[in-house]
Image: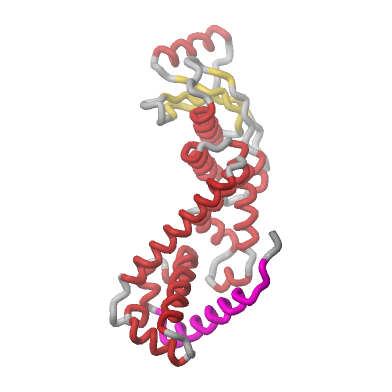
Amino acid sequence: MTRPSRDWWVIYQEPTPAEMTIVAVELPPDDDTAHDKRCAEIEEAGQRAYLITAPDADTASAIAMRVWADESVTSPEHPATARAYNAQPPHFLDHLETDMDPIALGTLCASVVNRFGVRTVAVESALLATLEYFHAESRNRAIAQFGLTPAEYLHRAMQTPCFEATLSTGALMADGREADARLNWEAYLQREESTAKRAHQAVPPTALLGDPDAIHRIGHRLGLSDEQTDQLTSRIVLTVATGYPYRSPCQLHLSLTDMLAQVTTEDLTLLLQLTALSATEHTHEPDSPR
């Protein structure tokens, strides 16, 4: 059931031009005299305020943070006194699962606005698309094999670098900055590859993925050269790293290196076969029309 919205004063200060700290969230005064007195107190304390329309104080805080982040990019100066900003919670909140945290999402949106200089409306559009994408993924039968419900998958997904990269890339695209969007996504992929590579390098030599000779012997049995085996193994490691945030509850205590160290000969043989087959299929696919 949707709670009725009401007006809130979100009072904040700026320790530096690049920082915002919310001092208080309170109901506006009822009469003009009290209103003027409170405005004077806020101004005297070197603080500012937004008038936000929201169902509760937490949501009002999140909206105020997004507004401030947007203004910090689009306007060189903020108003010196309390100002009215009647902002309804973004439309995408109506589409969220009940266990999603709109405050965390609002903070993430504000961070993207601040870091990339995109418009708030672009971030909110990208967030809706990102949520819809991960929501569709959460219904995939493979997710159930991880032992996760769709809600649990979404909760974990929202905390991953992939979610943030998908959101920020989508926001850049929505803002008309396609080149920046491509660079942002490529940088994310490079970070993921580096993380997977470091985890792989930390696998002890007593484990299969820490023994290059043992890996190559499996590759030879499959008719693969050492170079092909190394390339396919890197892809397998990256796949394991991508699925790492969604590991089963009994594996939550394991690091990515621990997970890689558990790969058996049977596992690697099957994965090399499947990855080689996938690579062959992609090689023979016709070019997509441009």
Magenta residue check for 254 = no
Relative vertical location of residue 244 with respect to residue 127 in this rendering, above or below: below
Magenta-span inclusion, residue 279: yes
Residue 169: image x %, image y %?
55, 49
Q: Residue at x 63, y 77 (%)?
A: 284
> Where 274 falls versus 118 (above or below)?
below
Nearer the observer, 265 or 182: 182
User: Where does the image place residue 56, in percent across and percent down from the top left?
Assistant: 57, 34
- Read off the magenta span: 263-287
Image coloring type: secondary structure
Which residue is pictured at 50% across the width and 81% down the height?
271
Q: Is residue 210 visible?
A: yes
Report the side of 112 relative to 258 (left or right). Answer: right
Quadrant in which the C terminus appears = bottom right
68 relative to 123, above or below: above
In this view, the residue farthest toward the top is: 33
Relative to residue 118, is residue 214 drawn left or right? left
| Chief SS of the magenta region | helix
Give the camera-side residue of 35 and 255: 255
Give coordinates of residue 24: x percent, y percent.
Answer: 45, 26
Q: Quadrant of the N terminus?
A: top right
Front position in the image: 229 or 195: 229
Q: Residue at x 52, y 28 (%)?
A: 71
